[in-house]
Image (tube, grey):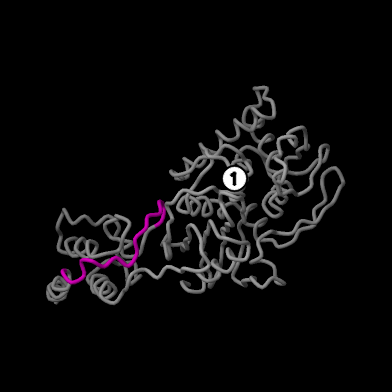
């Protein structure tokens, strides 16, 4: 019976040769149906699965998980039938054309499946999405309870930066500085965090503020490489535009998935508003720049669970968002949107269309 199914499927291969329902590549994630791992779901995957099922040692199948179209944790002839059916019925990928963006993606963080992709390997400036990396690197070298004094590194903050309004002499726990950096997107907090972490990583070396930031950028790049961000480079902790600071949506998905595994980052980025008392006694209320979390916003999404906004001239309006539905976690990333509103409209549009 199995051989009859396979023989019937082979007959469809020639007429499917020009079809490619999804073509993209995201390191660390897989495309459903992409059995041969070449970044596209097409008839080559059908051929690879057919050969694999017949025991051909040169089948070219590298991802039985991607070939499991029936999602029953078994790769068998029924997946071959499902693959053939999907290739016959599927049109070219449905890319959401409006609002306009530079690149966009949505993945299931639990399975690693790329559910939507558009220009995900195109280089882009990361803007304040960089701060998700800054937070992770800082937490590698400092305890969340470490008390840090805001100092002369504030002179490095560029004019026109987004600020959380800390000042020299303020003393805050790292955990609270991360709130100001990730919720209010404070570039001032990013520099204080970076300098403190760099000096903690090399306590035996005397560094100026500039040297500490430069060393922190080295730590950022090392950490990024370690987690698989192969298309990124960083020179500052806040995401200010620089020709040497770049990433891709593919890498941002990796960054976001790792960030979501960090309890402190999940807690902070998933909070819409937070009243904070500094270790030195001052107090402030920070609102999250992510409108998906704001119940009074027209872009509010009840499934939204956190992450980060970013905006610069080179990056456009960007957003990494995490959603939770029925116990499953999804991560989206959009970059290069034309307006603040567009990034939320596009993110919600992709999520509602795919999930």
Q: Quick one: label 1, few (<14), some, or many (20+) residues within 10 Å?
A: many
The number of numbered discs placed on residues in the rendered structure image is 1
Q: As displayed, is residue 6 above or below residue 35?
A: below
Is-magenta flag for residue 21?
yes
Is-magenta flag for residue 219?
no
Query: How far across and how far down the image is residue 130, in percent?
Result: 58, 47
Q: Quadrant of the N terminus?
A: bottom left
Q: Nearer the viewer, residue 34 or 159?
A: 159
Query: How far across and how far down the image is residue 18, in percent?
Result: 23, 66
- Magenta extent: 14-29
- Identity of the residue furthest to the right in this view: 281
Query: How far across and how far down the image is residue 123, in percent?
Result: 46, 48
The residue depicted at 22 percent of the width and 71 percent of the height is: 77
Horizontal side of 322 relative to 225 (left or right) equals right
Circle 1 SS class: helix
The residue depicted at 68 percent of the width and 43 percent of the height is: 190
**Which image quarter: residue 174?**
top right
The residue depicted at 50 percent of the width and 52 percent of the height is: 252
Query: How far across and how far down the image is residue 120, in percent?
Result: 43, 55
Q: As displayed, is residue 351 above or below residue 336?
A: below
Q: Main secondary structure of the magenta part?
A: loop
Which residue position holds label 1?
A: 136
């Amino acid at each position: 019976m199995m051989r009859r199914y396979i023989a019937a499927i082979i007959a469809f291969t020639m007429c499917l040769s020009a079809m490619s329902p999804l073509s993209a590549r995201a390191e660390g994630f897989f495309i459903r149906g992409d059995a041969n791992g070449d970044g596209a779901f097409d008839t080559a995957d059908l051929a690879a699965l057919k050969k694999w099922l017949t025991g051909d040692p040169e089948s070219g199948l590298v991802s039985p998980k991607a070939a499991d179209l029936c999602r029953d944790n078994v790769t068998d002839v029924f997946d071959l039938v499902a693959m053939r059916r999907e290739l016959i019925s599927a049109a070219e990928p449905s890319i959401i054309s409006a609002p306009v963006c530079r690149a966009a993606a949505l993945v299931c963080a639990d399975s690693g499946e790329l559910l939507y992709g558009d220009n995900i390997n195109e280089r882009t400036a990361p803007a304040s999405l960089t701060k998700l990396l800054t937070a992770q690197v800082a937490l590698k070298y400092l305890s969340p309870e470490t008390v840090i004094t805001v100092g002369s590194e504030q002179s490095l903050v560029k004019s026109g930066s987004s600020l959380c309004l800390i000042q020299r002499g303020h003393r805050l726990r790292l955990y609270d500085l991360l709130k100001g950096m990730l919720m209010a997107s404070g570039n001032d907090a990013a520099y204080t965090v970076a300098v403190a972490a760099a000096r903690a990583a090399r306590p035996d070396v005397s560094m100026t503020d500039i040297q500490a930031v430069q060393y922190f950028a080295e730590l950022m790049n090392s950490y990024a490489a370690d987690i698989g961000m192969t298309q990124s480079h960083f020179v500052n902790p806040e995401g200010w535009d620089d020709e040497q600071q770049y990433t891709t949506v593919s890498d941002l998905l990796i960054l976001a998935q790792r960030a979501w595994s960090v309890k402190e980052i999940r807690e902070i980025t998933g909070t819409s508003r937070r009243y904070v008392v500094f270790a030195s006694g001052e107090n402030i209320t920070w609102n999250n720049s992510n409108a998906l979390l704001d119940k009074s916003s027209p872009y509010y999404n009840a499934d939204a669970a956190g992450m980060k906004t970013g905006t610069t001239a080179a990056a456009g309006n960007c957003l990494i968002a995490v959603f939770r539905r029925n116990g499953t976690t999804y991560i989206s990333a959009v970059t290069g949107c034309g307006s603040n509103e567009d990034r939320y409209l596009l993110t919600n549009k992709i999520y509602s269309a795919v999930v």
